Structure formats: C-alpha cells, structure tokens
Image (tube, helix red, strand yellow):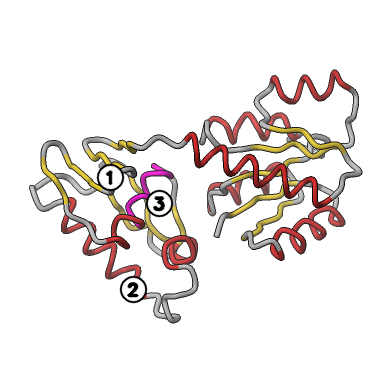
Amino acid sequence: MERILVIDDDPAITGLLRRGLSYEGFAVDTAHSGEEGLALARERPPDLVILDIMMPGLDGLQVMERLRAADPELPILLLTARDAPADQVRGLEAGADDYVVKPFTFEVLVARVRALLRRRHAERPALLRFADLVLDTGTYTARRGEREIHLTALEFKLLQEFMRHPRQVLPKDQLLERVWGYDFGGNTNVLEVYVKQLRQKLEAGGEPRLIHTVRGVGYVLKEG
C-alpha cells in the first residue's frame, strides 16, 4: 500500500483527500502546517506528497525544498489556489513534479497521483546501494562487498524497504504494512524475527551492523 502525505492548512481539503484517497487504496497521512508535514514525513516516509503553497509559517515551497533535501526522488504535487501561469512556472521550476489548481476535480487529481507513482517506479534504479551493501531489484540478489547473500522473498522485500529509505527511522507499523500488508495475523513479533534474520545474514562475514534499533519506534539503516 503506497503512502501519500497531504499537507494543507484547510481541514476541508485534507478531510476530502483522506477519505477519497483511502477509498482508492492508498494509506493517507494529513498535516495542517509545513512543520507538522515535515515531522510526519520523517516518522512515516511517504511515496508521494500533495502540498499546498500558501500556508502560515513554512510555506509550500520551503517545505518542498526540505523534502527534496531528504529524498530527491520523492514525487511532489502542488495543490494550490494560485492559478497564474507565472505561479505554475515558479512551482515547477522550484522542483514540483506536477501542479494542480484549486478548485479541482478529484478524479483528475487521482489520475495525476497514479501517473507520478508509475513514473517513480519506472525510474527507480535496479541497483540499490548503501555502504558496501548492494541490492539488485532486477535479479533479486544481494551482496555485501564481494560476498553474495541469499535472502528469502520477504527478507529481500524488507531489506529493499530499508535501502529505499536510508538513514530514515522506519516505524514498525509502517514496515509491517509495506512488507506484509495485512497478512501478518496481528503478530507484530514477525518483524523482530525477520530483522534478526537479516542482521545475521548481513553480518555473517564479520561486517559492521547496518540495521539499528530505535527503541520504542522502529529501525533505521545507517552506518555506525
């Protein structure tokens, strides 16, 4: 289930998008300020952000700059009442992937969201690298240095989630949702078991630990 973060100071907009996008099969987080949106993005990294420009405090363009610094490939769709061509050009040149003007048609917005997500999947590199760890998403193989690592399908999927969000703390509930969906039977211990197995395989050659526990929250892929 792909996660969408909606950042808009209008509760009517966030409520509409939460209901509509959830019905379309997305996991949806909402924030009513730039600061709250950035905090949510750190806690639960989104697959796409829908972002208003005109907000008190940090405006949308400032928020976009910070989101881009954390994840240059994150799709960002600006949703704003600013309809002048110059505003659209400014937003796109500042780094937005798309620009939708309020008032909007929900069906058109969903089509734009799906198009951005398809493009992101198509552009994702086959090789994911972190430190001396390489994950080939095309051949479903992994290496640490010159050592080949044999992973099960679920181990591979879990490691892929870590490597797509390096140095970001990934909460346990998000990992369960993205890797297992709703098929883990309510047994949250399954995540701890798989993290332990991954660590054993990644460190079998005496290499330093890469997957670290953040107590009370989840896990993070980082060096040291």
Residue 16 placement (x, y as % from top left): 82, 59
Residue 198 placement (x, y as % from top left): 23, 58
Q: Along the polypeptide, which appears first: circle 3 or circle 1? A: 1
- Asked if residue 29 is positioned above or below residue 109 in the image, the reply reads below
Task: Give the alpha-carbon distance from disc 3 to disc 1, as whole Å.
Answer: 16 Å
Instruction: Give the residue at mark 1.
Output: 139
Q: Which residue lies furthest to the left in this view?
A: 205
Name which residue lies at 83% across and 35% down: 54
Name which residue lies at 70% across and 19% down: 93
> Which amino acid, by three-letter code, is at mark 3?
Glu
> Which amino acid, by three-letter code, is at mark 1?
Thr
Instruction: Give the residue at mark 3.
Output: 161
Answer left or right for 19 relative to 159.
right
Q: In which quarter of the image is the N terminus?
A: bottom right
Q: Callout 3: 10 Å neighbours few (<14), some, many (20+)?
A: some
Answer left or right for 119 relative to 95.
left
Residue 5 placement (x, y as % from top left): 65, 50
Q: Is residue 161 magenta?
A: yes
